[in-house]
Amino acid sequence: MTDKKNILLIGEHAKESALAWKLLQSPCLATLYTSPGVYPGAIHVTGLDPRDFEAVADFVEKQEIDLVVAGDTKEIVDGIADALSETRAQVIAPDAECARLEGSKEFAKEFMSMNAIPSARFMTVTTDTYDEGVGFLESLPGPYVLKADGLASGRGVVIVHSLADAKDCLRDMLDGLFGEASSTVVLEEYLDGKECSVFVATDSKDYIILPTARDYKRLLDGDNGPNTAGMGSISPAPGATEEFISKVRTRIIEPTFRGLEAMGLKYRGFLYFGIIDIDGEPMLIEYNVRLGDPEAQAIIPRIKNDMVDLLIDIAEEQINRTVIQVSDDTTVSVVVAAPGYPSHTVVDNLVTGLSEAIGMGCYVFPGEMKKNPTGHLVSAGGRILTVVAAGKNYEEAARKALEGVEAIETDGKQFRSDIGLYI
């Protein structure tokens, strides 16, 4: 049996909650430490700033941490894997150079182009090339996709329907709509199709494909309302047949890893491929250098493998000995969001009913929550928690998840009632 491992899980969202839940089931786990998130069964490390890499390195040595799992984009892009490379711990995350796949939309699009990965036509625009950008927009039929080059907390992608709005939005972004993140803007051709989230785990030499998912970005039922960081997800993704995933593997995943290898880069950790199905042909929308939220909440309960074993195989470059085992169940995850989200989020509302939802057979993964001075759970951000249910099909899982959501009590809660039903 593998020696038990001490693990530090960095992150504070519902996807880290799902990971913590899974890790805590493993007989290979010694102790799970978390920062800044607080999860039942794990030891919350108070006072540790995950973005203070020197402090994290000191903690790793003092607590004899074997594995560090970095869940949040910011720490990964800023180079936590590089900063901890001389410590005793193995980091389950790519280094900063590989993380540019998510950290820079410009880099990602140029990488796709250089490696003949099918994707939308694009142009990179700065203030100096605004007029050329307008010309590119005029060459497109619309709708129009504008992406901040850098990280913008999940808000940096804008889709508008009129050319006039696209020109105005481009100017606003270049003028600082998303701060420094939009000092460079990537304009893209709009692709109309069904989306599919494909995740792989890789040790830099080999990879395995995890369960697929589809997430729901719009706030309101029927895919209406503003874009969000995600209001729910389903797994498996509808239409993700063996034939389709085989195309994703040969046309997108493998060219990605060949391209990284050609650049002398070794990618280790989880990599997300945002895929869109155009008449049965996959095209790549974007990369994320981590598991997705809310997709992780739907796929992790379907993975039968020991998660600590999987992380060890990634760290030891032995992932080829892993055979992924996936439940036949369908899962539906529904995000419970705070009033005002995503634009003017109201926080500090009391949140109750978690145990009731769990008692109904749901998984409840806390997200942006905290305890107030009286010890009660309150909202601390836009996406408060995620309720997940499994079933024989989307309809059954959706019904169970919504029953769990109804058990959650918090003022002004927002959620979509059509996750798994609107496909």
Image (tube, rainbow, N blue to C red):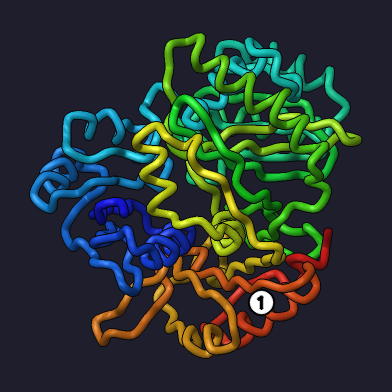
Q: Residue at x 70, y 69 (%)?
A: 416
27 or 161: which is nearer to us? 27
User: Badge 1 is on which residue?
Assistant: 401
In the orientation shown, which residue stands out farthest toward the front? 1
In the orientation shown, which residue stands out farthest toward the right? 279
Residue 360: where, in percent of width, then height?
59, 88
Q: Residue at x 42, y 32 (%)?
A: 268
For numbered disc 1, what is the local secondary structure? helix
Q: Residue at x 35, y 47 (%)?
A: 69
362 or 139: which is nearer to us? 362
Q: Amino acid at mark 1?
A: Ala
Q: Is residue 21 above or below residue 90?
A: below
Residue 260: where, in percent of width, then height?
51, 17
70 or 135: which is nearer to us? 70
Q: Is residue 139 above or below residue 284?
A: above
Location of the C terminus (image quadrant) = bottom right
Q: Residue at x 54, y 89 (%)?
A: 359
